[in-house]
Image (tube, rainbow, N blue to C red):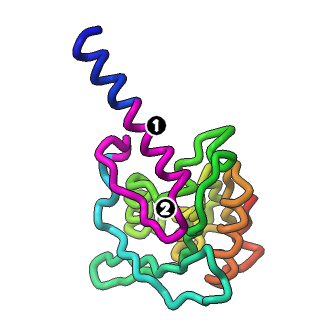
Amino acid sequence: MNVTQQNHHEMARQRWKMLARALHRNQEEKPADDVISVRRISSFGLINLLPMKNSEESPGEEWFDYTIRIGQEMYSLSIRHITQNITPVDLMGFNNTGNICVWPSEEVLAYYILCNPEAFTGKSVLELGGGMTCLAGLLIAKYTNASIICLTDGNVSSIENVQCIINKNGFSKSKVSCS
């Protein structure tokens, strides 16, 4: 076995160990920042997340105020994070990475949307695979004059979470839907 193959096998072994730790960790444990993770950039720093006062009646969830500053304008949205453990069943069937994080690409898209709200005036918007937050679509709904916004994901838990976010932020049901 050559050095390249050995490195490949070692990286694969470390990824399996990382998955095992994620599946076996206690509710109180925080995930480790593994250097072996494929995700190399966690954020571009365009969005600030501020924890909101969370109800003790709803364990397994945390609310955050996502804020973006562009020039003198401040944009914000209340976003719900699910904090319960991920099970093997949650990971099966299709790519579920959007169910555990906001990707840096979505952060950049959110910033672009807020810099160019006129691009969405009168438009119908369909967000496919928006994950647990559908952040881009929700910002379009709140800060542009788009006519209709439909937010989608293939994961039932994601859609339930997005519906909670829609309700918390007081969106008009005639303008925003999720499925």
Nearest the camera: 28 or 81? Answer: 28
- The residue range painted magenta reads 13-39
Q: Identify the residue at image location x=43%, y=58%.
A: 109
In this picture, is 107 found above or below 38?
below
Image quarter (top left, top right, bottom left or bottom right) of the N terminus = top left
In this picture, is 130 found above or below 160?
above
Helix, strand or loop status at disc 2: helix
> Is residue 172 toward the left or the right of residue 54 in the image?
right
The outermost residue toward the top is: 1
Q: Which kind of residue does numbered mark 2 sit on?
A: Ala
Q: Can you give x and y, in whole percent of width and height, for residue 27 in the image? A: 54, 68
First-in-chain label (1 vs 2): 1
Q: Residues within 10 Å of mark 2 (few under 14, many from 20)?
A: few
Q: Can you give x and y, in whole percent of width and height, for residue 73 in the image? A: 35, 83
Residue 155 part of the magenta-drawn span: no
Q: Can you give x and y, in whole percent of width and height, for residue 111 in the image? A: 38, 65
Mark sitting on residue 16: 1
Image quarter (top left, top right, bottom left or bottom right) of the C terminus = bottom right
In this picture, is 19 found above or below 99?
above
**Label 2, on which residue?**
119
Q: Identify the residue at image location x=70%, y=52%.
A: 155
